Amino acid sequence: MRLTPPVSAMYPPIEPYEHGMLDVGDGHQVYWECCGNPDGKPAVFLHGGPGGGCKAAHRRAFNPDRYRIVLFDQRGCGRSRPHASAVDRDVEADLSTNTTWHLVADLERLREQLGIEHWLVFGGSWGSTLALAYAQAHPSRVTELVLRGIFTLRRWELDWYYGGGAAAIVPDRWAKFLAPLPAAVAPATMEHSDSATIIEAYRALLHDPDPAVHGPAALAWSLWEATTLTLLPRADMVDAFGEPEFALAFARIENHYMRHAGFFIEGQLIASAGRLAGIPGVIVQGRYDLATPARTAWELHQAWPDAELIMVEGAGHAFDESGIAQHLVTATNRFGWV
């Protein structure tokens, strides 16, 4: 039996005991894996992005003796196929079957495939979005929610991150994000502007068949995220987000979801939070999160009082920032004994 680690650290690295590809329809095969204890409490990890894919570190947020840990790569990214970085097919048509509600259905199909009745759902950033959408659609299947960096794709949230709100804090990084855009589109000043125009201009660049066009655009989109996710800069994150195949899939999928505001009615996830009544939860939010400002976590907490809100001082957005990781592990440790 492994001992519970200090709350400041995640569990040691582990490998899957089972993995496979699940046919979810529409020509998509999604990669899934199970780690930890096959007889443990089921928990599913929902990665961010969308389009970020799962990483080995994501397995480490759970006690492997207590949990049956399920991870999967959402449509079009990671080890799932077809991959959105491919340029030899109609990528836009492929993304037409990549929506929040397709992913919610994929989750249910995976749960049934694995013979799981209900599970703890863990998600951060876009993963928190998907977790909320899934839990509101299937509340009886969710035992607990552990969420980080809450994102609900409301218009003000999109305008903050893709319309120049965050530029007030990181103007140099924002200038690099705007660099690939035509002069007629890029804001002439650092004033907060409409994100829809910028997102739409990026869509055209990301789906241009010429690698000399879509390549630099994908890197600029991806590196904007990599350089704003942590309180202090991290070279390892920049390197990972700057890998060309990752960047292209990530940027295309994320841009697609931002363009459609997550396929939600404005304010839907907060307005429907009453469907979470009775589901215990923990919301872990970095105080200085540039990507998903703390206001959304606060508003979710007001609408869902069953959840505990933990505001982490001295932290940004990333899953593995020390203060954030500490509270996430503490939450899964607590629910692992329920």
Image: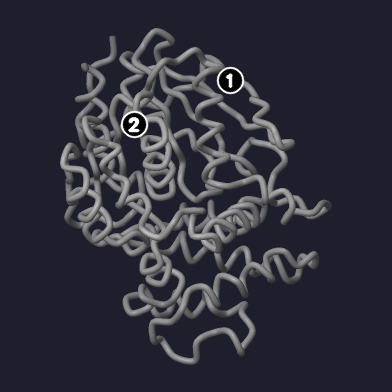
Left or right, residue 177 beside residue 39: right
Left or right, residue 329 beside residue 266: left
Q: Residue at x 23, y 35 (%)?
A: 277
Per the image, the residue denoted by label 1 is: 19
Q: Within 10 Å of the Cα at label 1, are there few (<14), some (14-19), or many (20+) other Cα atoms?
A: some
Q: Amino acid at mark 1?
A: His
Which quadrant is home to the C terminus?
top left
Whether residue 58 can be seen here:
no
Q: Residue at x 65, y 30 (%)?
A: 24
Q: Marks 2/1: CA distance?
A: 19 Å
- Residue 201: which disc? none
Left or right, residue 197 beside residue 274: right
> Percent x, y for residue 308?
16, 40
Q: Amino acid at mark 2?
A: Ala
- Residue 61: which disc? 2
Q: Residue at x 73, y 71 (%)?
A: 213
Which element is circle 2 on?
Answer: helix
Q: Nearer the viewer, residue 227 or 111?
A: 111
Quadrant housing residue 273: top left
